[in-house]
Image (cartoon, rainbow, N blue to C red):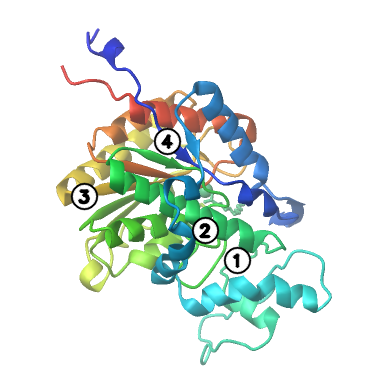
Amino acid sequence: MNPHLDQATPQPLITLYSEGHHQHHGQAELKDGQLVPCFEKPARADMILAQLREAHLGAIKTPEEVYPEVQSHWQQTLAKVHSQDYIDFLANAWREWSAAGHQHDMLPLAWPPRRTTSIRIPDSLDGRLGYYSFDAGAPINAGTWPAITDTVQVAIAAAELLHRQQSHVFALTRPPGHHAGRDYMGGYCYFNNAAVAAQHLLDRGAQRIALLDVDFHHGNGTQDIFYARDDVLFQSIHGDPRACYPGFTGYADETGEGPGKGFNQNYPLLPGSDWSEWSQALALSIIKINHYAADALVLSLGVDTFEGDPISHFKLKSEDYIKMGQRIAEANIPVVVIMEGGYAVEEIGLNTRNLLIGLMTPPQES
Ligand code: OKP
Ligand code: ZN
């Protein structure tokens, strides 16, 4: 046995969290042609928080506690990864919807098909709702704006803390963000929390950020935001788009464009993949990160790769998340973990906790 293993005492890990996410709770989503209760719900974050407290992983702080200026700065950072018209749409959407007398969640009904002569922004709210979304999986209600702006501040404060202390930080963000593109929502996502964290690190002087997305689903929104940029190396390990949601992107031949050519990397894996297949893709991605010589790593963490996830198709076990965290720690750069998916609510806390424990206690070099 490695004699150093048992000497590896976990360092405290600071978690950033804000209560505001509770205000966002959608009523229903479509699954296999049926309206079912939303899988993406406040209990997800509550379960993670409970496990972090039980494991005494470290302090849990609000964005204002670590970075009081976040309240006056977040909109600037947000506007670098999302278009202002999209941000304004989200800011006003519920007010317009409720003024029209509606009480149920907003959900889009129509999208422009291929070969649309010219796509303009409709005046009507229904028109804009379709224009600014790629699916009907991101309901908007009264609490959506407070929740998504709160969680963007969680992501920024976590990035700020990483910048200051140069050690790992966990941003307990909810709702997730990696399906949100520059000017669209979808797949439970509105603002791209991971992209905002990466942008904040660049604004603080980082030259190169690696953004690794380990959620079961392809991070199509993050790919969209950074596709033509070379200051963020985006990599995603996910269910093969031939079989898995969102299904239109995530192929291995999507490698970036213009100055971003070579800075986008997808690792599609077949449904049913377990740790042995999954960890091979991870190893390849870590080699890329090392080669890129990133200043920091933004980890889009979805634990919907878990074997018990109700909407996903990989076969990772709870113990595998410890190994995942350890392997990622071997990249030897500070990591800001941004929470994305994970819908096996009973196990979401344990799986997340295991990842974080692995990250904080890598096997020691002998
Ligand atoms: C968000 B994240 C498949 C339906 C998929 C949306 C899934 C969004 C996942 N039958 N519905 O990446 O965890
Ligand atoms: Zn996912």
Disc 3/disc 1 C-alpha distance (Å): 33 Å
Secondary structure of the residue carrying numbered label 3: loop
State the residue at coordinates (30%, 36%).
328
Dot 2 alpha-carbon crowd within 10 angstroms: few under 14, some 14 to 19, many 20 or more: many
| Mark 3: C-beta under 8 Å from nearest atom of ligand 1 | no
Query: Does 48 appear above or below 201?
Result: above
Disc 1/disc 4 C-alpha distance (Å): 35 Å
Task: Give the residue number, with chain letter if any, for mark 3.
Answer: 294
Disc 4/disc 2 C-alpha distance (Å): 32 Å
**Does the image show residue 152?**
yes
Task: Give the label, 1 or 4, closer to the camera.
Answer: 4
Q: Amino acid at mark 4?
A: Ile
Q: Nearer the viewer, residue 261 or 366?
A: 366
| Mark 2: C-beta under 8 Å from nearest atom of ligand 1 | yes
Secondary structure of the residue carrying numbered label 1: loop
Task: Give the residue number, with chain letter if any, for mark 1.
Answer: 135
Disc 3/disc 2 C-alpha distance (Å): 28 Å
Q: Are marks 4 and 3 in contact (CB under 8 Å)?
A: no
Location of the N terminus by quadrant is top left
Q: Are marks 3 and 2 in contact (CB under 8 Å)?
A: no
| Mark 1: C-beta under 8 Å from nearest atom of ligand 1 | yes
Q: Are marks 4 and 2 in contact (CB under 8 Å)?
A: no
Task: Give the residue number, with chain letter if any, for mark 2.
Answer: 246
